[in-house]
Image (tube, rainbow, N blue to C red):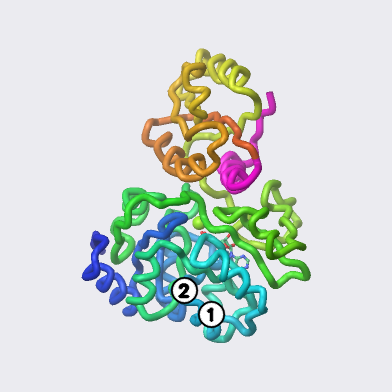
Amino acid sequence: METKFLQNNMDDIKTAGEILKNGGLVGIPTETVYGLAANALNSEAVEKIFKAKGRPQDNPLIVHISDLSEIDDLVSYVPPVVYELADVFWPGPLTIILEKSDLIPSVVSGGLDTVAIRMPSHPVARQIIKAAGVPLAAPSANTSGMPSPTTVEHVMHDMDGKIDAVLDGGPCEFGVESTVITLCTRKPRLLRPGGITPEELEEILCDLEIDKAVLSELEDNEVAASPGMKYKHYSPKAEVFVVEGNSEDFAEYVNTISKEEKGIFALVFTEDESLVNCEKISFGKKEDNLAHASKLFAALREFDELGAKKVYVHSPEYDGVGLAVMNRLLRSAGHKIIKL
Ligand code: AMP
Ligand code: MG
């Protein structure tokens, strides 16, 4: 199939809405990463998402809405705290898991009796949802296992010829996926860190728990609270290592390896640039977690373009949005951490 390339104007947004209404797939911009959208209430359309991505069937999708009132039909009950959360964080990069209603097909929920809901803040994303007239199921628009797409070029790289259309809304603001919390456990629980930090959530959810899978690997016999957490993720072809240590030690470590081996690359902070001799990409100043988030996935894709065999990443801090960056990095590195 030929993938239509749509622009950010009202005619093309309308076209995207028509395609979605008729059961097609469209790559759409959001403030987190590009999503691969389908009508969430049409199981045949949603099945095409799994096929295009090669996504495991048991990994549920997030349902995107454009107005808070749309949530009523999608879940069996709206706990009052949802309105408090929505007041502060919606539209925005927060996904809330609730008990699903019968309207949500089981292909969307990966067979679970819960559903993940989010209202994106990207105006074009909400305009497309409105134009489609239905809630949109949309995972990240990458081939399963690859880094998530933060530009329309990334989407085309993975999805050209596999989906009906993609709409260019420019590069994504946050660059990492939404924060996912569930309200279906005894205490509210953070399943995936993202643009909204645990500290911000704790202002409303004082008893928020952090799921073990956020920073550590699940044992073979453990069940993932969020099915997506058990799969290899965000992985470029190059082998990725996370390296903890100060700038001098990090530079000495990668400089030594790159003298002995070919294809060695580093993902560094601005402060490391003058010290590191091998080929490198910078993802911003050491303290700038938001810059790391917005550049991470594009950098991982660029390493592949450059033919990297091994990538050594200077580890950011775990606080604030840094928790989301570390969560993605540890997955892309298969949890290989080198402590200097
Ligand atoms: P993606 O759409 O690729 O950003 O991934 C969505 C993430 O949300 C995955 O990690 C899913 O496992 C998780 N998720 C979606 N729906 C549910 C649900 N009902 N229960 C638990 N996790 C969910
Ligand atoms: Mg994804």
Between 247 and 151, which is closer to the camera in this rendering?
Answer: 247
Identify which residue, 229 or 260, lies in the foreground. 229
Q: Which residue is mark 2?
A: 65
The furthest residue to the left: 11
Q: Secondary structure at mark 2?
A: loop
Q: Residue at x 64, y 83 (%)?
A: 77
Q: Amino acid at mark 2?
A: Ile
Provide the residue span drawn in magenta: 318-340
Image: 279 above or below 78? above
Q: Is residue 7 left or right of residue 29?
A: left
Q: Secondary structure under badge 1?
A: helix
Which label sits on residue 33? none
Decide whether residue 320 is among the magenta residues.
Answer: yes
Mark 1 closeness class: few <14, some 14–19, many ≥20 residues within 10 Å: many
Any atom of ligand 1 within 8 Å of the CB at mark 1?
no
| C-beta proximity under 8 Å, tags 2 and 1 | yes
In the displayed structure, 183 sits above or below 307; it is below
Residue at 44%, 38% in the rendered image: 299
Q: Quadrant of ligand 1?
A: bottom right
What type is the residue that disc 1 sits on?
Ile
The mark total stands at 2
Disc number at residue 71? Answer: 1
Residue 310 seen from this side: no
| Left or right, 204 with reference to 4 | right
Q: Residue at x 51, y 32 (%)?
A: 285
| Of callouts 2 and 1, the N-terminal one | 2
Picture coordinates of residue 154 (x, y %)? 36, 49
Q: Looking at the image, is 118 positioned above or below residue 281? A: below
Q: Say which quadrant the C terminus sits in.
A: top right
- Identify which residue, 305 or 197, lies in the foreground: 197
- Verify whether residue 220 appears in magenta: no
